[in-house]
Image (tube, helix red, strand yellow):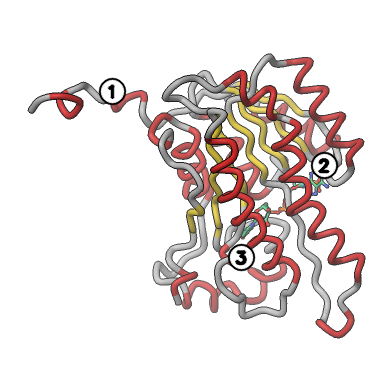
Amino acid sequence: MAGEASEAIDVQSLFTVKGKTALVTGGSRGIGLMIARGYIESGAKVYITARKADVCDAVAKELSAIGECVSIPADIASPEGRAKLVAALSDAENSLDILVNNAGANWGAPFDEYPDSGVEKVMNINVNAVFALTRDFLPLLEKAAKPGEPARVINVGSIDGIHVPTMDNFIYPASKAAVHHLTHVLAVTLGERGITVNAIAPGPFESKMTEWMLENFKAVIEEQCPLHRIGAPSDMAGIAIYLGSRAGAYVNGAVIPVDGGIHLK
Ligand SMILES: NC(=O)c1ccc[n+]([C@@H]2O[C@H](COP(=O)([O-])OP(=O)(O)OC[C@H]3O[C@@H](n4cnc5c(N)ncnc54)[C@H](OP(=O)(O)O)[C@@H]3O)[C@@H](O)[C@H]2O)c1
């Protein structure tokens, strides 16, 4: 062999986020907590944010037993809350290697009665906050970007943004399709500045958001999944570590379903 193919790849350091600094929005429970824990176990310093300060602080304290975790409670649905988060992180760190835009919400109501306030709430947290935080963390992300080792933005979309969900659900799937296309657009825009932007599109995972659905339909969902199970925390941590690690350095603008193949059916 000759040329690049004969160079050592250093596989040991390929799938790790050791030494990186990450922010996981909505890191206090559910999918955000799965990602935060995976990053911490892999050796990253992780900031988590959520509205409920006592819960966010308690989770960060618990995770600090494994590694470095810092709580910055904030409501990222409001410009004031986002400004508070950006200011607190900018005071504490000179750069940010990984921004995980995970916090999101749903609103359930029959179509004929679906309120404007539901549309506003879902679009605001699921789409507006993703755009605004990526824009406002740009200075810190740019400082983390190195040749061959870009800073990462990882958006959490949903398979509901790929297929039409079977359950009555209207604005949420549209918001997630918007997250996926925002990911494409920002990947092209920010790639030029040393930052990759990708999205994880989860299928069903245990969380507060899916509590009611899994209590009532878990068996049906498992039956429909080609792998006959829902997602596990290690499935979510695995994809997030991949996208945040050197292994994912050349992946940009990808929307990766993590659903056991449900979206294909
Ligand atoms: N679970 C699934 O099966 C699934 C599937 C597809 C996609 N997703 C996506 O995965 C992401 C996480 O969902 P999840 O299921 O883990 O939901 P979850 O259990 O409801 O967790 C949501 C997290 O976001 C935080 N949060 C909500 N609104 C916030 C706000 N305005 N400001 C700051 N933090 C806020 C929550 O903490 P506070 O309440 O304290 O603010 C919590 O930490 C969402 O984007 C969701 O759409 C989930």
Q: Position of residue 201 (x, y in %)?
A: 55, 57
Q: Secondary structure at mark 1?
A: loop
Residue named by callout 3 = 161
Q: Position of residue 249 (x, y in %)?
A: 43, 33
**Which residue is found at the position 64% from the left and 27% from the top?**
46
Total count of labels: 3
Q: Identify whether 228 is placed above or below 46.
A: below
User: Label 1 sits on what residue type?
Assistant: Asp
Mark 3 or mark 1, whichever is nearer to me: 3
Image quadrant holding the N terminus, namely top left
2 or 1: tag closer to the N-terminus: 1
Image quadrant assignment for residue 228? bottom left
Q: Residues within 10 Å of mark 1 (few under 14, many from 20)?
A: few
Image quadrant holding the C terminus, namely bottom left
User: Label 2 sits on what residue type?
Assistant: Ile
How far apart, in angstroms, are the residues tagged by discs 2 and 3?
A: 22 Å
3 or 1: tag closer to the N-terminus: 1
Q: Position of residue 81 (x, y in %)?
A: 88, 36
Residue named by callout 1 = 10
2 or 3: tag closer to the N-terminus: 2
> In the image shown, does 165 or 30 lie closer to the viewer?
165
Q: On the picture, is 165 further left or further right than 109?
A: left
Q: Is mark 3 within 8 Å of ligand 1?
A: no
**Which residue is found at the position 49% from the left and 62% from the top?**
259
Let me know if residue 40 appears in the view.
Answer: no
User: Label 3 sits on what residue type?
Assistant: Gly
Let me know if residue 108 appears in the view.
Answer: yes
How far apart, in angstroms, are the residues tagged by discs 2 and 1?
A: 38 Å
Q: Identify whether 157 is placed above or below 133.
A: below
Residue named by callout 2 = 76
